[in-house]
Image (spheres, rainbow, N blue to C red):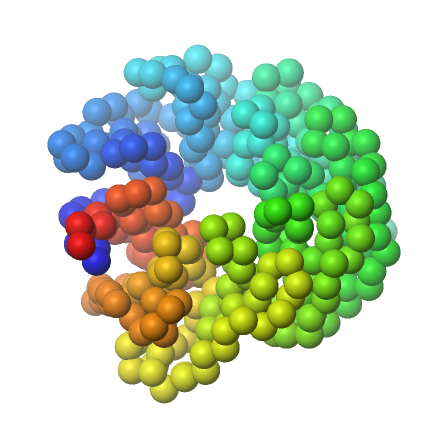
């Protein structure tokens, strides 16, 4: 299904792909690499270690833990900004907003987060102490040990707030679709779906709360971890349950599968201990494609990226493996 066409060594984690143009940092330089022509186009020297590279129109924005920089179409630095508040999330929302930590209460061991406008160079609103900001589809939510809330992304206005114990771990945002937002509560082995507009609890199920991903095409909540399962996104009803750990081990993908993406009817997933990546068919419950890299592993914190027809997988040694989907 996929053929390996390139590998690039010594790549920082903040890389992005637009069409066939791969932008990444290696050491103190930023490169633009055309996958089709296999040519590196630019290599300017930079001072920051960027954890995120985001292209908005003709501007490339690099996000580091301490600030951000703007580059023009030739990758010349237009502006570089160092900020007082550490960056918490290396994504950009509404093409201008990032999540930063604005304060920390050392007596209570609670942090405070806010939303910063990278063009105004200032924090435009803050959440309460102990609340972490999570953003999905440009909708802002807050999570704390006391519950879930929704805020207006642009001004911080509270839309709704639901008190709900989460144990010793903060609730984790899984995703949102069709007016439903899903959070998992790892400490309680619970997954809860809320109405995005009202905060009403739509459903709640007791499952091992990891390895979850929303399928917006099929209206399903997939779970790929020790085995595979799928739930109806609107009701939480179990729709599929495939448990065959010996089969997954025989393929070479047995130690973890929480780092995965959806591509049609396939789940593209890896093993964290061995350099194995595969395409699991959610209909037939078989791997239609498996690829192995010797001497490396694919750690779960680094996300897999798929932009049709290119698949990017990052290994533990800092090498980016580039695959292209083959025509069937």
Residue 276: give x, y in percent of width and height. 29, 67
- Which residue is drawn at the image coordinates 42% and 26% (left, top)? 55
Depth check, front residue: 52 or 37: 37
Q: Is residue 282 above or below residue 156?
A: below
Quadrant position of residue 192: bottom right
Q: How many marks?
A: 0
Considering every residue shown, the one lying at the far top of the view is 78
**Of the pair 71 and 284, the residue shown nearer to us:** 284
Q: Is residue 173 left or right of residue 194?
A: left
- Left or right: 139 with respect to 103? left
Tell me the quadrant of the picture where the C terminus can be found. bottom left
Note whether residue 203 is visible: yes
What residue lies at 74% left-to-right and 58% top-to-bottom?
202
Up-down relation of residue 35 to residue 6 (above or below):
above
Q: Position of residue 291 (x, y in %)?
A: 22, 65
Q: Quadrant of residue 210?
A: bottom right
Instruction: Write the residue at 43% across / 68% down.
Output: 257
Give how far across and how far down residue 114 sits, in percent: 72, 34
Residue under the image location 72 percent in, 45 percent down: 196
Q: Position of residue 299 (x, y in %)?
A: 40, 61
Quadrant into which the N terminus falls: bottom left
Q: Nearer the viewer, residue 24 or 1?
A: 1
Left or right side of 94 for 37: left
- Viewer-proximal residue among 317 and 297: 297
In this view, which residue lies farthest toward the left?
Answer: 37
Q: Looking at the picture, does residue 255 appear above or below residue 214?
A: below
Of all residues shown, which one is farthest toward the bottom? 246
Q: Is residue 271 visible?
A: no
């Amino acid at each position: 299904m996929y053929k390996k066409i390139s590998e690039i060594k010594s790549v920082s984690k903040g890389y992005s792909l637009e069409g066939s143009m791969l932008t990444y940092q290696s050491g103190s330089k930023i490169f633009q690499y055309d996958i089709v022509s296999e040519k590196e186009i630019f290599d300017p020297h930079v001072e920051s270690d960027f954890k995120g590279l985001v292209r908005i129109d003709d501007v490339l924005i690099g996000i580091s833990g301490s600030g951000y920089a703007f580059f023009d179409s030739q990758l010349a630095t237009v502006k570089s900004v160092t900020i007082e508040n550490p960056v918490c999330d290396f994504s950009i929302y509404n093409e201008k907003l990032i999540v930063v930590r604005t304060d920390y209460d050392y007596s209570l061991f609670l942090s405070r987060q806010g939303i910063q406008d990278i063009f105004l160079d200032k924090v435009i609103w803050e959440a309460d102490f102990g609340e972490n900001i999570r953003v999905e589809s440009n909708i802002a939510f807050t999570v704390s040990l006391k519950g879930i809330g929704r805020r207006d992304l642009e001004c911080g206005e509270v839309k709704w707030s639901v008190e709900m114990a989460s144990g010793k771990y903060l609730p984790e945002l899984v995703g949102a679709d069709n007016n439903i937002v899903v959070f998992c509560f790892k400490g309680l082995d619970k997954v809860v779906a809320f109405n995005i507009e009202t905060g009403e609890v739509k459903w709640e199920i007791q499952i091992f709360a990891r390895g979850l991903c929303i399928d917006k095409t099929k209206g399903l909540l997939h779970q790929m971890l020790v085995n595979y399962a799928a739930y109806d996104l609107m009701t939480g009803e179990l729709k599929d349950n495939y448990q065959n750990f010996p089969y997954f081990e025989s393929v070479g993908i047995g130690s973890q599968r929480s780092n995965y993406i959806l591509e049609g009817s396939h789940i593209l997933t890896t093993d964290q201990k061995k350099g194995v990546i595969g395409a699991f068919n959610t209909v037939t419950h078989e791997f239609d494609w498996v690829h192995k890299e010797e001497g490396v592993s694919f750690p779960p914190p680094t996300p897999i990226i798929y932009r049709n027809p290119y698949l990017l997988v990052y290994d533990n040694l800092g090498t980016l493996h580039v695959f292209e989907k083959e025509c069937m």
